[in-house]
Amino acid sequence: MKIGDQNYQSIWIDENDPAVVRVIDQQKLPFTFEIKDLRSVDDVYNAIDDMTVRGAPLIGAAGAFGMYLATLEINSQTNIREHLSNAARFLISCRPTAVNLSWAVSFVMEKLKDVQSLTSLTKTALDAAVEICEIEKENCRQIGKYGLKLIEAISRKKKGAPVNILTHCNAGWLACIDYGTVTAPIYLAQEKGIPVHVWVDETRPRNQGSKLTAYELGQNKVPYTLIPDNTGGYLMQQKLVDIVIVGSDRTTKKGDVANKIGTYLKALAAFDNKIPFYCALPSSSIDFSISDGMKEIIIEKRDPDEVTHLTGFAEGKIQSIRICPEDTIAANYGFDITPARLITGLITEKGICRPTEKDIKEMFSYKFN
Ligand code: MRU
């Protein structure tokens, strides 16, 4: 996507130094646009951990590039297989909820399985990481195509009045290498001249909505309104939301969806108000090995400081301020589970399906054991 006149992905290899992986520092947006260089497995781990890079498809791609950097750390003393397995385990351990991380790291490991020479290991790992980026970009393009049909249908029904889409967190190009899962249909609708308007949940505690989704939509001139996380239910009662589209960090084979904390409450409100609630996700976010989201998905717990403090921009710099009494005990669950029964459909790269094992299996039979 474009920032000013320049096209960016949210991760890429430095064209002047292939030993450097470059990422957009999402901790600094929207206040400053900075690029960070990652040169080692530790750098990649730290960037995922502190959310310099975030969003399920992007942390997958970052993990894959981490495996590439792991091959560059090999020297004559290294036990290669042990080194690669340790790096894979280390990277996967960084964030537990989004399945894309383990999917992508395993994708690279599988490609490296029978490769012997160091030069070939490095080349194979780099090719695999780049391939993952291409897969995710194409997934988003396809999701865009299918999601567009939903927006078009609503637009027809509303006789061209703006389609009001509510979204939570950031499932845009920053999170997905390019285009975004939730945003691809929106950008396509905009390109086709269909009037759209996005209600952007601020997405406490880290504010991916107010900081990142608002930034992306603004850069692409998509009309949006920022709302506190508690506002969606009221807007739905007032018929000011036509469709909810959110992303996913892990979806079970029966269609339960783990997504950013607060998603479940939006799904409940949408269900109560008979508003279509869709999850846009690439198959790299589906965990075909599990069925029950509530029981089987590990929910990441993050630093309580993210709840007790707010980070914003004041006096020319990014600053953090405390917003509660000192010594406040806070809980910071990163994700929640929206059960399949509250979800109207899954928008995937293969089309839209109902969140049932039967429909998911029909669409992705080759991924079922
Ligand atoms: O904790 P984050 O910001 O990495 O969370 C991921 C998300 O942005 C979402 O939950 C998103 O909707 C899925 S990623 C396209």
Image (cartoon, helix red, strand yellow):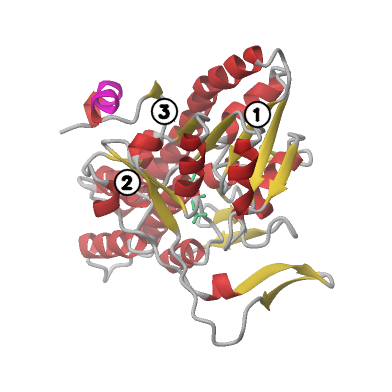
Q: What element carries label 1?
A: helix
- Going from N to C along the chain, the mark reached first, 2 or 3, is 2
Q: Which residue is drawn at 70% across and 40% down?
A: 217
Report the amino acid beneath label 2. Trp
Label placed on residue 345: 3
**Can residue 179 be seen by looking at this rendering?**
no
Label placed on residue 103: 2
The image shows residue 327, relative to residue 266, as above or below, that is below
Locate residue 176 relative to residue 336 in the image: left or right. Answer: right
Q: Residues within 10 Å of mark 2 (few under 14, many from 20)?
A: many
Q: What stretch is highlighted in magenta?
A: 358-364
Residue 211 placement (x, y as % from top left)? 67, 54
- Going from N to C along the chain, the mark reached first, 1 or 2, is 2
Q: Residue at x 54, y 26 (%)?
A: 144
Q: Is mark 2 on a helix, strand or loop?
A: helix
Residue 324 is drawn in which quadrant? Answer: bottom right
Q: Mark 1 points at which residue?
A: 187
Task: Kindly report the secondary structure that dominates the magenta region of the rendered protein.
Answer: helix
Locate residue 194 relative to residue 14 in the image: left or right. Answer: right
Looking at the image, is mark 1 or mark 2 nearer the viewer? 1
Report the amino acid beneath label 1. Tyr
Residue at the limit of the structure toward the right, as seen here: 315
Does the CB distance between marks 3 and 1 fall below 8 Å?
A: no
